[in-house]
Image (spheres, helix red, strand yellow):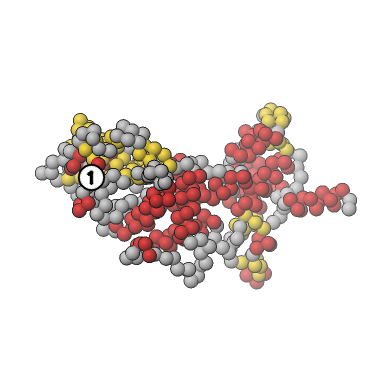
């Protein structure tokens, strides 16, 4: 075989051609590709920004780009049906190389100049692309769909403990609800979401009430008694649970819309450290790069958990308390699963506010009997912090 033919065969196999262009790390926004250039490049003149910087041949960078693409996309020829009468590939969306680079993963690449997008798409073979498993669901979509189905059945079930997921008639579910719960539990551990609320942390709590009500003690501002405890985001009715926030404005925002004209807000402090699942941390976790193939599992996990976290933090209208059932089931499962055998139990969860974008709330498995005006219980109320607000 001649050298030219061998080169052509190699380019066909790898999915892209040859180029004399060099690109520097400044022209690439994606953190992984930037590191790839820094680790494998050398000082040279960039063909795109004309700076003298650490550069790499564009042909070499293409290897990392293609490895990333093949994590979530594949060749339509390999996985899709084709019908000339129907206009080509059928049953799922397809992209040419230009659309793939510009529109599908353009924001991931985050190139700093338009010419670089053009050169990368021009280097790629004239292929038609589709998402991996085009007739199925993406892994994180499948997981979330299973959770949604499970959640809907929970809302309709009389007994949570006997719930079973039936296979969907139209779409086969590759994961069971138990597997989803286990995957979330494993994700909590992998992402190190189990944290401690240190002793003496200010936990703000607010209550809406009428003019005649006197709210000036732990008994009146703290967790409600069992007979007064309604169904809430992370507890069923008749289970006394302390809900608070980490700042005054979030605490007040969480009771916005209540009909009563008065608000009383105050600060409780915890006497001991509290072990919690910090679901609010998920929002701030950085998504691994598409091109960081060694962290592709973490990327899929975060795609699911970020979407899941938005779902469980959404506002719920009054009178629709059944919407809380899936979150209650989840927290019950995680608390049992993640509590240590040596009595290091989960004391609650931190979650993002449904009212304030940056607000964080907490739900603590601490009942009314552990809320005090003195420092003799787990939570004590600082009476100097009490503020009465008339709307």
Categorize mark 1 by other alpha carbons within 10 Å: few (<14), some (14-19), many (20+).
many
Residue tagged 1: 368
State the image quarter where residue 327 is shown: bottom left
SS at mark 1? helix
Classify the position of the C terminus by image quarter: top left
Left or right: residue 215 compared with residue 119:
left
State the image quarter where residue 47 is shown: top right
Say which residue appears at 64% left-offset and 44% top-offset. 117
Q: Position of residue 124 (x, y in %)?
A: 70, 50
Decide which of 250, 183 is in the foreground and name it.
183
Say which residue appears at 67% left-offset and 44% top-offset. 64
Decide which of 362, 265 is in the foreground and name it.
362
Say which residue appears at 62% left-offset and 46% top-offset. 293
* Vertical comparison of 95 with 86: above or below: above
Decide which of 72, 351 is in the foreground and name it.
351
Q: Position of residue 248 (x, y in %)?
A: 28, 36
Q: Position of residue 190 (x, y in %)?
A: 50, 44
């Amino acid at each position: 075989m001649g050298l030219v033919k061998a080169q052509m065969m190699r380019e066909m196999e790898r999915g892209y051609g040859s180029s004399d262009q060099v690109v520097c790390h400044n022209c690439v926004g994606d953190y992984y590709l930037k590191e790839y250039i820094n680790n494998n490049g050398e000082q040279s003149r960039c063909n795109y920004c004309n700076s003298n910087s650490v550069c790499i041949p564009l042909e070499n960078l293409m290897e990392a780009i293609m490895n990333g693409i093949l994590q979530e996309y594949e060749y339509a020829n390999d996985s899709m049906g084709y019908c000339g009468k129907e206009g080509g590939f059928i049953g799922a969306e397809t992209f040419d190389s230009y659309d793939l680079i510009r529109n599908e993963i353009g924001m991931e690449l985050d190139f700093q100049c338009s010419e670089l997008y053009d050169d990368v798409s021009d280097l790629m073979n004239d292929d038609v692309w589709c998402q991996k498993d085009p007739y199925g669901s993406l892994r994180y979509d499948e997981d979330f769909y299973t959770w949604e189905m499970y959640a809907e059945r929970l809302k309709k079930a009389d007994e949570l403990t006997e719930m079973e997921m039936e296979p969907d008639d139209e779409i086969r579910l590759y994961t069971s609800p138990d597997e989803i719960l286990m995957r979330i539990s494993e994700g909590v551990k992998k992402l190190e979401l189990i944290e401690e609320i240190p002793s003496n942390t200010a936990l703000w709590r607010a209550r809406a009430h009428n003019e005649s009500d006197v709210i000036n003690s732990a008994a009146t501002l703290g967790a409600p008694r069992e007979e007064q405890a309604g169904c809430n985001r992370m507890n069923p009715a008749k289970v006394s649970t302390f809900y608070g926030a980490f700042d005054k404005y979030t605490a007040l925002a969480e009771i916005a819309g209540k009909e009563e004209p008065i608000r009383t807000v105050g600060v409780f402090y915890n006497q001991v450290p509290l072990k919690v699942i910090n679901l609010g941390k998920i929002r701030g976790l950085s998504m691994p790069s598409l091109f960081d193939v060694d962290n592709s599992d973490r990327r899929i996990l975060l795609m699911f958990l970020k979407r899941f976290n938005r779902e469980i933090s959404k506002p719920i209208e009054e009178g629709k308390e059944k919407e809380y059932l899936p979150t209650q089931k989840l927290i019950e499962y995680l608390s049992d699963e993640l509590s240590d055998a040596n009595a290091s139990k989960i004391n609650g969860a931190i979650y993002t506010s449904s009212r304030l974008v940056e607000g964080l709330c907490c739900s603590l498995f601490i009942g009314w009997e552990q809320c005090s005006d003195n420092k003799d219980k787990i939570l004590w109320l600082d009476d100097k912090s009490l503020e009465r607000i008339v709307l």
